[in-house]
Every structure is written in structure tokens, then in C-alpha cells.
Image (cartoon, rainbow, N blue to C red):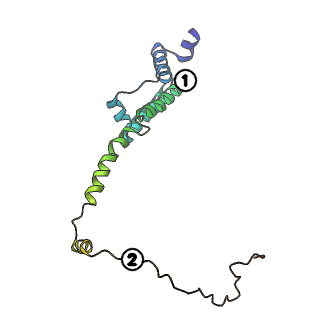
């Protein structure tokens, strides 16, 4: 403890170092209001600036712990389904997409569709039994025949 006190410095810095170590090691979930504030561009900038100020004005050990704690804070603030709070807030849900698609595809029936529905169905007859025709192969123009098995 004396060596740690000597390395860290004053009591305030020792307490800060212990708090940062506890925050880093314990998987603490952040409250939603704090996570929403940190998980924005301005929140990330403010937290980064505070960490750099801690690094510049304090002991280098406290600065390194502060950088690691800042990283952990930013990572933990964006932990809703792997997507950050800000991105999750602005994403459209699947139910609203389905509702939009059904609204976009809800067209009134046009006159053309009505007339096609009223038309008699097409009648297809089976092919005649006594048809005698054979396909004709034109000149090949130096192409290989279909049943050619030689070197290509």
C-alpha cells in the first residue's frame, strides 16, 4: 500500500485510482440517461477531453487508468443490442416498416385491372396428335456440332 501511495501520490489520487480500477474491472451497466448522454458525438468529445485533462494534469498512472476507463465508458454506453442508444433511438422498427409497405402498396383497383378480371379465361388446347415436324439445323458456319466430343 505504501508503494502504491508513493507511486500514485496524494490520497485523492489514490482514491481516484481505486475508483477507476473498480470501474474498469466491474462490469457496471450505466443508467440510461448517462448512457444516452455519453453515446452521442458531443458526449464522446466531452468524455475524451476530460480523460485527456486527467492525463495531462495528473499522474501518468492515473492518466492511463483514465484513458482505459474512458474507453470502457464509451463501450458500455452503447450496449443495447450491440447498437448505440443514439442509433437505436433513430432506427425504424420492423413493425413500422411493414405498416409503411402495406400503406405504399394499397392502390385502388384501376379500370384496366377490373376489365382483365372480367375477361373470359384463356383456353389452351392440347397439341394435336398427328403433327409431324422435325427441327432443321442451319449451316454451322465453322462451329462444332452439338454432339461433338473432340478437343475444343
Residue at 44% from the left image edge and 38% from the top image edge: 82
- Mark 2 sits on what residue? 124
Point out the residue furthest to the top here. Answer: 2
- Establish if 35 lies above or below 2: below
Point out the residue furthest to the right here. Answer: 151
Nearer-the-camera pick, 93 or 148: 148
Q: Which one is earlier in the sequence, the residue at label 1 or at label 2? A: 1
Quarter of the rendering occupied by the C terminus: bottom right
- Mark 1 sits on what residue? 61
Dots 1 and 2: beta carbons under 8 Å? no
- What mark, if any, has residue 151 been given in the picture? none
Residue 69 lies, in percent from the top left, at: 48, 27
- Establish if 21 lies above or below 141: above
Point out the residue furthest to the front here. Answer: 130
Q: Residues within 10 Å of mark 2 (few under 14, many from 20)?
A: few
11 sits left or right of 141 in the view: left
Tally of numbered discs? 2
Dividing the picture into quadrants, the one containing residue 124 is bottom left
Inspect this view and state whether residue 99 appears: yes
Q: In front of the other: label 1 or label 2?
A: 2
- Establish if 7 lies above or below 68: above
Residue at 52% from the left image edge and 16% from the top image edge: 9
Residue at 51% from the left image edge and 29% from the top image edge: 68
Amino acid at each position: 500500500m505504501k508503494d502504491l501511495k508513493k507511486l500514485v501520490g496524494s490520497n485523492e489520487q489514490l482514491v481516484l485510482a481505486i475508483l477507476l480500477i473498480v470501474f474498469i474491472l466491474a462490469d457496471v451497466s450505466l443508467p440510461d440517461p448517462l448512457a444516452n448522454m455519453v453515446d452521442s458525438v458531443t458526449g464522446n468529445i466531452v468524455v475524451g477531453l476530460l480523460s485527456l485533462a486527467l492525463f495531462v494534469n495528473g499522474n501518468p498512472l492515473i492518466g492511463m487508468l483514465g484513458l482505459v476507463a474512458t474507453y470502457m465508458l464509451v463501450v458500455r454506453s452503447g450496449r443495447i443490442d450491440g447498437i448505440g442508444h443514439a442509433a437505436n433511438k433513430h432506427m425504424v422498427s420492423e413493425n413500422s416498416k411493414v405498416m409503411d409497405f402495406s400503406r405504399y402498396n394499397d392502390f385502388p383497383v384501376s379500370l384496366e385491372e377490373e376489365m382483365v378480371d372480367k375477361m373470359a379465361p384463356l383456353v389452351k388446347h392440347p397439341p394435336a396428335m398427328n403433327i409431324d415436324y422435325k427441327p432443321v439445323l442451319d449451316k454451322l458456319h465453322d462451329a462444332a456440332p452439338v454432339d461433338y466430343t473432340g478437343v475444343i
